[in-house]
Image (cartoon, rainbow, N blue to C red):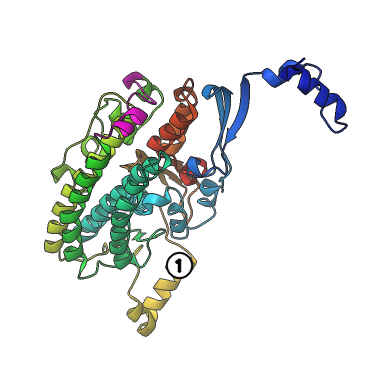
Amino acid sequence: MKKTIKETIKETIKESKNSVDYKNITDFYNPNILINIGPSHPATHGTLRLMCQLNGEVIEDTKFEIGYLHRGKEKLGEVKTYHQWFVYTDRLNYCSALINNIAYAMTVENLLEISITARCMWIRMICMELSRIIDHIICVAINALDMGALTIFWHLYRWREEAYTMIEGMCGMRLTTTYARIGGMFYDVPEDLHDNLKKFCERFPKALDEMETLLTTNRIWIDRTKGVGRLSKEDAIKYSTSGPVLRASGVDFDLRRDRPYYAYADIDFDVVVANNGDVYDRYLVRTEEMRQSIRILKQCSKHLQSANGPLWVDDRRVFIPDKIDVYTKMEVMIHHFKIFMEGIDVPPGENYTAVEGPNGEVGFYIVSRGGPKAWRLRIKAPSFLHFQMMENTIKGVKIPDAISILGSLNIIAGELDR
């Protein structure tokens, strides 16, 4: 007589001396299986851990764990001088390091009550919009790659490298830039920036059109993204989401327009809003935001060409002299030495400054008691707020859908753990 699977398993367990003594053979048939997605899984985009209880391929329950990339950045900000801590801002959202640099510089400048020059402002706005494009390219390209669309990855990453090449021409670095300084920028822009930026602004929208031809109306892409990971308008507000995730759920809010900083109030651009709050709408919002960033870049480039004034603010407390003067003038060398060895003296006070980052509101809160170091430094990172909502969002979906939802939120472990 043919043995059943259950009888075969029972005999195997009895015969094997090394086998676990299962008291209840039904353990083999428990439909709820616990698996870990991450922290070393490539689709988690960083050191994230998703513990999922599965029933077949459906995620019935989930628990997330953070902290694998915690480096104590906020406490380091309290033992490093304001200048020394700049390099740590690069390693928050390393896909858009320039925005972190500038937001932190803005916070310290507000404590010092410093207003930067027009030339510095336009350079910073160009840097922020280039970073936004780079970050959105990475989000869309990697999310498409996770779902099998390899062509999109190679198609978009070419333009990411073009943007990085312009950034490299400005500050000598591509990924971790440390370009901004308190009261100015480390270098002025190269002479060929405007020509390169013009070419980029002309050609990149055509690449976006080609990408949309491949994705936006693609039946497979629509099936994999439409209605997946839906976040209602009410939930988006309840979970304190921001950026493209918030706007994809129908909330018309953008810090560049609603709490304008620098010259964004004078720049012509549209805030992109969708309604469904699913993976597909987040993709559409980011795609259109890249086009809006091109519009902003064109206007900023035009203004920068006519802004021929100084790069640095005329404030001896923060002004970093040129190297040629440091090497040839004793007083300048002493001033340079004091800035970098002792740090700048920031008066007592507190300030929170936020900018519209690629993934949402990026903010720095600094409390100063005077001196060259912050007494307290805290970071508001959009990834931290977006990751908390995923536990409820992915319940009831299948494993591949969980990967697409995670990619659409664009969680960056560097700013999640800090």
Q: Describe the element under mark 1 as helix, strand or loop.
A: helix
> Is residue 404 visible to the viewer in this orientation of the structure?
yes
Residue 305 image offset from top left, x and y in percent? 13, 63
Can residue 220 be found in the magenta stretch? Answer: yes
Residue 394 image offset from top left, x and y in percent? 47, 25
Q: Residues within 10 Å of mark 1 (few under 14, many from 20)?
A: some
Seen as rendered, the residue at the extreme front is 1
Residue 25 image offset from top left, x and y in percent? 76, 17
* Residue at image point 21% right, 46% down: 210
Q: Name the side, left or right, on which 35 lies relative to 169.
A: right
Q: Which residue is mark 1?
A: 340
> Is residue 260 visible to the viewer in this orientation of the structure?
no
Can residue 307 be found in the magenta stretch? Answer: no
Picture layout, residue 347 above or below residue 241: below
Residue 312 figure quarter: bottom left
Which range of residues does the magenta coloring cover?
217-234
Q: Quadrant of the N terminus?
A: top right
* Residue at image point 48% right, 41% down: 43
Residue 67 figure quarter: top right
* Residue at image point 13% right, 57% down: 303
Q: Nearer the viewer, residue 284 or 30?
A: 30
Residue 346 image offset from top left, x and y in percent? 41, 54
Amino acid bearing label 1 = Phe
Picture layout, residue 306 above or below residue 251: below
Q: Name the side, left or right, on which 8 lies relative to 160.
A: right
